Amino acid sequence: MDAFQRLFDRALEIVAAAMMTIVTLIIVAGFMFRWAGHSLVWYDEVAAISLCWLTYYGGALAALRGAHIGFPGLVNAMPANWRVAATFFASAVTIFFFALLAYMGLQVVQILKGDTLVSIPEISLQVTQSVIPITSALFVIAELVKLPGLLREAKRGPLMDHEVKEALESVGIETTEANPGRAS
C-alpha cells in the first residue's frame, strides 16, 4: 500500500504543480494583454475556473498528506481504544461526505449538458465542473489509503500533527509510526 500511496501522492503533486503553473501563466498573460490595451475576453472566466481546479486538486493532495484541519489534541487526550474509534469515525464521515459530493457532482455535470462557457462557447460546462466528482473520488481514495496508517498510529499512541511531523523531518529527525519525533 505504501508504494501506491507514494505514486498517488506524486501524481497529485504533479497535477497540482501543473495547475499552479497554468494559473500563473493565465494571470500573467491576462495582465500583460490588459496592460498592452488588448484585454482577453476569456481571461476572467478561465482564470476563475483554473483557480478552482487548483484548489480542488491541491485539496486532494493535502487530504492524502493529512494536512487538513483536524483535532489531534482532542483525539490524543482519549484512551487508545477511543482514539482508534474517533479516528475511524472521522475518516468514515469524511469518506461519506466526499462520496456524497461525488454523487451530487455527477448530477450537476449531467444537468449542465449542452451549457458552455460564456467567453469560449467551444468549452462545455460539463468539462469545467467535472472537477467536483473527480476530485471528490480522489479525496475518498486518499482517505482510504491513509486510514490503515492512521489507525495503527492511533493504537500506538498520540497522533502526530502534520505540521509538526514536517518540521521534524525538515531538520533531519525521522518520524515513523513506531517512534514519532525520535531521532534516528
Image (tube, rainbow, N blue to C red):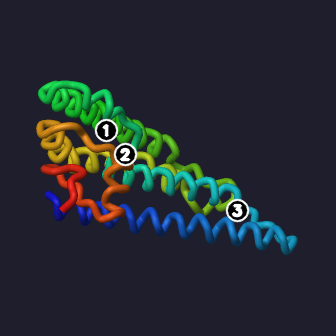
Q: Residues within 10 Å of mark 3 (few under 14, many from 20)?
A: some
Identity, as a three-letter code, of the amino acid under mark 2: Ser
Instruction: Of the two numbered discs 2 and 3 on the same chain, state the one appearing first in sequence.
Output: 3
Q: Residue at x 30, y 65 (%)?
A: 172
Nearer to me, 162 or 113: 162
Residue 106 found in image quarter: top left
Mark 3, residue position: 43
Up/down of 143 relative to 2, above or below: above
Q: Under tag 1, what secondary structure? A: helix
Q: CA distance from mark 2 to mark 3?
A: 27 Å
Residue 39 found in image quarter: bottom right
Q: Are circles 2 and 1 on residues that touch, CB within 8 Å? A: yes
Please state the horizontal and vertical placement of residue 117, each as a whole percent of the image: 63, 55
Mark 1, residue position: 99
Please state the horizontal and vertical placement of residue 140, each as a whole percent of the image: 29, 44
Please state the horizontal and vertical placement of residue 10, each as a whole percent of the image: 32, 66
Q: Residues within 10 Å of mark 2 (few under 14, many from 20)?
A: many
Identity, as a three-letter code, of the amino acid under mark 1: Ala
Mark 2, residue position: 136
